[in-house]
Image: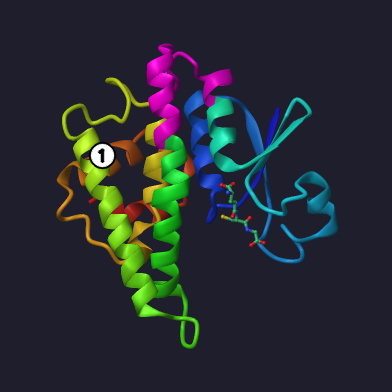
């Protein structure tokens, strides 16, 4: 059985959702983000990078959430979560990497400075600059999904799952989705999937189901 090391308020959510989509049996070991969890000696033996998520699939230990999701999609969901055409694969990988290195990076910075930090760490200028970058990313995404409702081709793929899961953090970046109707519909539709309902703690997806 696949083992997931994660917790319900972490990037493990995208991996748990991918596993739920495939219907594979898996078990999750809860790992906290502290010296008893990610930073413990025991966990560092599993992931020397001291981060969750990690999976163990038949002895293969993988860390980094995006490659894990793509591995799960290709191995266990190739017919429905992945694509066959090499050009579509290029686009799927492009948007998946973009979700982490662009969208997520700016959502995280905006969230830290607009919601989580207090003085003296809180810096509204850094927060507002990051919000502007998120809005730039949202404009790109809005025009990409406007016609088909999907990132690649005409079906839900692992790229939609990754982008959607990254966007579940946007409430903390204090950015309204009102100017982005396609993205609002996209989040509602994707987070209403039965596998998403099973994968997420209800309070995480609730703001996007209205
Ligand atoms: N790029 C990594 C980032 C993983 C990451 O930052 N995970 C956080 C939880 S969401 C973590 O494990 N932090 C450990 C800690 O703060 O000790 C991925 O996408 O898997």
Q: Where is residue 179 in the image (x, y as percent from the top left)?
A: 14, 54
> Is residue 92 rendered to the left or right of residue 14?
left
Q: Pick whichever, 44 or 100, lies toward us.
A: 100
Residue 7 is a magenta residue: no
Q: Position of residue 56 (x, y in %)?
A: 72, 34
Give the magenta part as a residue range. 73-95
> Is residue 48 rendered to the left or right of residue 174?
right
Q: For the residue with label 1, is its CB less than 8 Å from the closest atom of ligand 1? A: no
Q: Which residue is drawn at 46% across and 83% down?
A: 118
Q: Is residue 191 above or below residue 168?
A: above
Where, by quadrant of the figure, is residue 98 drawn? top left
Instruction: Specify how the rendered protein is coloured.
Output: rainbow
Q: Position of residue 76 (x, y in %)?
A: 56, 20
Q: Residue at x 23, y 31 (%)?
A: 149
Magenta segment main secondary structure: helix
For residue 202, say whether it is visible: no
Q: Pick whichever, 90 or 203, lies toward us.
A: 90
Q: In this view, does 78 lie above or below 8?
A: above
Image quadrant occupied by the N terminus: top right
Name the residue that disc number 1 marks: 186
Q: Is residue 124 above or below residue 42?
A: below
Other residues around mark 1 within 10 Å, as few (<14) / some (14–19) / many (≥20):
many
């Amino acid at each position: 059985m696949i083992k997931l090391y994660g917790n319900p308020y972490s990037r493990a959510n995208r991996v748990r959702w991918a596993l739920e989509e495939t219907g594979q049996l898996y078990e999750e070991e809860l790992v906290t983000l502290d010296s008893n969890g990610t930073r413990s000696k025991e966990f560092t033996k599993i992931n020397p990078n001291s981060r969750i998520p990690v999976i163990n699939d038949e002895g293969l230990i993988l860390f980094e959430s995006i490659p894990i999701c793509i591995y799960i999609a290709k191995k266990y969901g190739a017919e429905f979560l992945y694509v066959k055409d090499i050009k579509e694969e290029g686009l799927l990988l492009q948007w998946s990497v973009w979700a982490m290195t662009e969208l997520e990076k700016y959502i995280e910075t905006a969230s830290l400075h607009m919601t989580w930090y207090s003085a003296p760490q809180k810096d509204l200028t850094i927060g507002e600059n990051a919000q502007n970058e998120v809005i730039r990313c949202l404009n790109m995404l809005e025009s990409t999904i406007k016609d088909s409702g999907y990132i690649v081709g005409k079906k839900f793929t692992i790229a939609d799952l990754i982008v959607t899961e990254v966007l579940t953090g946007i409430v903390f970046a204090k950015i309204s989705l009102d100017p982005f109707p396609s993205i609002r519909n996209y989040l509602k539709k994707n987070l209403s999937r039965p596998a998403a309902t099973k994968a997420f703690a209800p309070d995480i997806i609730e703001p996007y189901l209205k």
